[in-house]
Image: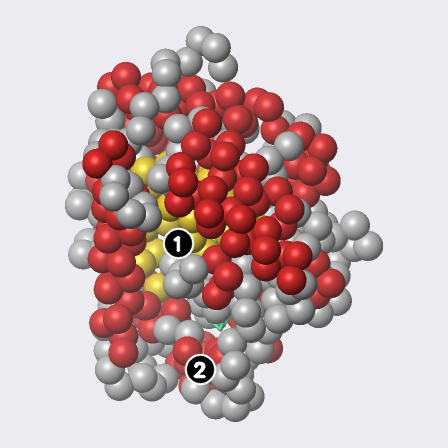
Amino acid sequence: MSTLLPILPPDGLLEQQDGFSPAAQAAEEDKNRMRRYFQKTEDALGPVAHHEPVCLYLETTNRCNLLCTTCPRTYEQLEPEADMPWDLFTSLIDQYPNIARVVLHGIGEPMLVKDIAQRVKYLKDRGVYVLFNTNGTLLNEVNGKALIDAGLDELRVSLDAAESDVYQMVRGKDFFDKIVENVGRFTAMQRELNAPKPRVSLWLTGLRETVDQLPNFVRLAHRVGVFEVYLQRLVFFDDPMSDKSLARAESALFEHTTAREEALIQEAEDVAKELGVMFSASGAVDPGESIKQQKDDAPWSLCRRPWSLMYITANGRVLPCCIAPFSMKGYGAFTLGNATQASLKEIWNGGEYQRFREGLLTSAPPPACANCGLRWSL
Ligand SMILES: C[S@@+](CC[C@H](N)C(=O)[O-])C[C@H]1O[C@@H](n2cnc3c(N)ncnc32)[C@H](O)[C@@H]1O
Ligand code: SF4
Ligand code: SF4
């Protein structure tokens, strides 16, 4: 790390008066702007969607180089291993030329895709907001520079821990130091190039086993020049996939948070405020709020994803969202079409999609929806 440029506060941090730095506030405004796209769907919810999707999740690959203990991919091959073919990728985008936002990860590591920067560029040439989550293991100066040049808007690094042994427990392999170094170099390069985009953030999936990492996780983010940190809500199966899997009810920071866990989250919030880091929970008002189970008897009724987005796997399978694979095993029960066989427009208001939406509006939702983390990542 000694070879890195000194870490400077983001533009405007020195003028900070209260709470987040102006740069972090700008990031929050950016996010709110993205959320507004989803509000289009508020009118006339029914089996037929009256608007085109505003967001596509394109699983650029389902390959991965980690063995995260929270991820279904570690325990089960969900589909044949593949990168999404370039022709399928472009044909999907070309079917919705006005799409507002495209997310380039699914279940797999997008930086394993050799032409990932070219894919970003294809989207940026069409004015799309582009982001993806990465495990950060492969982020180097060459592909990092290519992502900057391509115009990537957001790069979310899933780090899950503030120290190496805890990292290994959650992510299955010993890559912690490497990722920290990669991220530090990347943000240093951004400062050197005066390149504010992509906005880089660090993500920690909320586990009872790792909540004590949070205050140092925020400090670590600051140390490597990252000014956004997210506590991500765990999604889990009723019946864990293995006795090593941390995607299980006992590990989730839901209603049963202890006073100690709440104090740790508060401490992380205080550290973040002091350092000018924005600390937030995906889609929720604040991190403490995100771990509280929703009081509503039918939380799925708040979900608007099947009216606002489509998720297409590397093999062309269409799913309602990126969350269902974490809440229900296998893809069979929530496959809504095959994008290699039909157009997205046909699938979007086809029979499967209509039945899925209809179910979501009842008191007996599709099984994947009954137990999902609704506020998981906008
Ligand atoms: C499936 S990964 C794909 C992108 C990339 N491989 C990565 O790890 O960032 C997308 C996100 O899901 C998170 N994740 C993994 N298991 C999860 C779970 N059970 N609940 C919620 N998020 C989870 C990862 O940490 C990551 O931020
Ligand atoms: S969470 Fe991401 S890095 Fe971890 S196994 Fe799943 S796809 Fe791979
Ligand atoms: S699984 Fe969850 S996020 Fe996905 S459609 Fe169902 S309720 Fe919505």
- The local crowd at label 2, few if under 14, some if 14 to 19, many if 20 or more residues have their Cα within 10 Å, is some
Q: Position of residue 34 (x, y in %)?
A: 26, 57
Q: Amino acid at mark 1?
A: Tyr
Q: Is residue 378 above or below residue 352?
A: above
Query: Which numbered disc flags the more N-terminal residue, 2 or 1?
Result: 1
Residue 303 to residue 122: above or below: below
* Of residues 117 and 349, the one drawn nearer to the viewer in this rendering: 117
Q: Is residue 133 visible?
A: no
From the Cβ of disc 1, is ligand 1 less than 8 Å away?
no
Q: Quadrant of residue 49?
A: bottom left
Q: Which residue is label 1 attached to?
A: 57
Q: Mark 2 is on which residue type?
A: Ser
Residue 31: % across, % down? 29, 53
Q: Which dot marks residue 301?
A: 2
Tell me the element at label 1: strand
Q: Is residue 334 visible?
A: yes
Residue at the spot x=52%, y=81% of the render?
295
Q: Which coloring applies here?
A: secondary structure
Q: Crowding near pointer 1: few (<14 within 10 Å), some, many (20+)?
A: many
Circle 2: element type: helix
